[in-house]
Image (tube, helix red, strand yellow):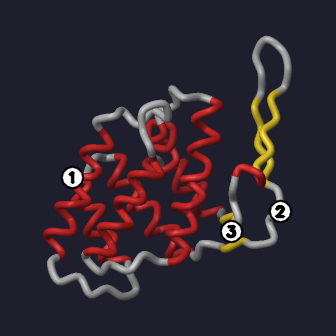
Amino acid sequence: FIHGDLHPGNILVNISPGGDPVVSMTMLDAGITTELTERDRRNFRALFSAIVQGNGEEAGRLMISHARAHECKDPDAFCAAIGALVDQALTTNLSLGKIQAGKILAEAFALACIHRVKIESNFASVCIAIMVLEGVGRNLDPNLNVLRAAAPILLTPVGRAIESRA
């Protein structure tokens, strides 16, 4: 499920004391949630796989093809703009100390508005959750490379197995 009211006040971070601390997170107030359909999960995974692989133009094409509706007059321009955004993001090595995922996602949303590509509500909910968790993650480990951490889940048979159980 996707928490529909995720903000720092609804995230409890627990760090165990000791030489090798264990960090756990608890999401509070989950009264507003959404669930990704199998189609949404497949589309989301394909999009972020394209980003992880550095193929921003493919990410743009996927955003258009997965939109339930769009009025994009120049798909090539939209894909090129998303490609440039992904290229720019990847140059930061995507460590939480260097990247502003919220800013990048806001720019992607702005491009979608300019080019009239409808962002699905479930996808927007996931992106908002990512924006909120980015700040928490930055405080916990600013050197964490987000895409490197996500790649095993997105790109391997283990990731597909996890997805199929969800």
Measured Cα–Cα span from mark 3 to mark 2:
9 Å
- Residue 116's spot in the image, x, y percent? 29, 81
Q: Which of marks 2 and 1 is nearer the N terminus?
A: 2
How many residues crowd around disc 3 within 10 Å: few (fewer than 14), some, or many (20 or more)?
Answer: some
Contact (CB < 8 A) between labels 3 and 1? no
Q: Nearer the viewer, residue 142 or 48?
A: 142
Q: Mark 3 points at which residue?
A: 4
Q: In the image, which disc is placed on residue 54?
A: none
Q: Mark 1 points at which residue?
A: 84
At horizontal 53% and vertical 51% (from top left) the residue drawn is 159
Image-quadrant location for residue 136? top right
Q: In the image, which disc is placed on residue 29?
A: 2
What's under tag 1, amino acid-wise? Ala
Measured Cα–Cα span from mark 3 to mark 1:
30 Å
- Residue 34's spot in the image, x, y percent? 67, 74
The secondary structure type at the circle numbered 2 is loop
Task: Report the residue that reaches farthest toward the top.
Answer: 19
Determine whether, in the image, residue 31 is placed left or right of residue 125. Answer: right
What's under tag 2, amino acid-wise? Asp
**Is the residue 84 above or below the residue 146 in the image?**
below
How many residues crowd around disc 2 within 10 Å: few (fewer than 14), some, or many (20 or more)?
Answer: some
Measured Cα–Cα span from mark 2 to mark 1:
38 Å
Which part of the image, by quadrant, shows the N terminus? bottom right
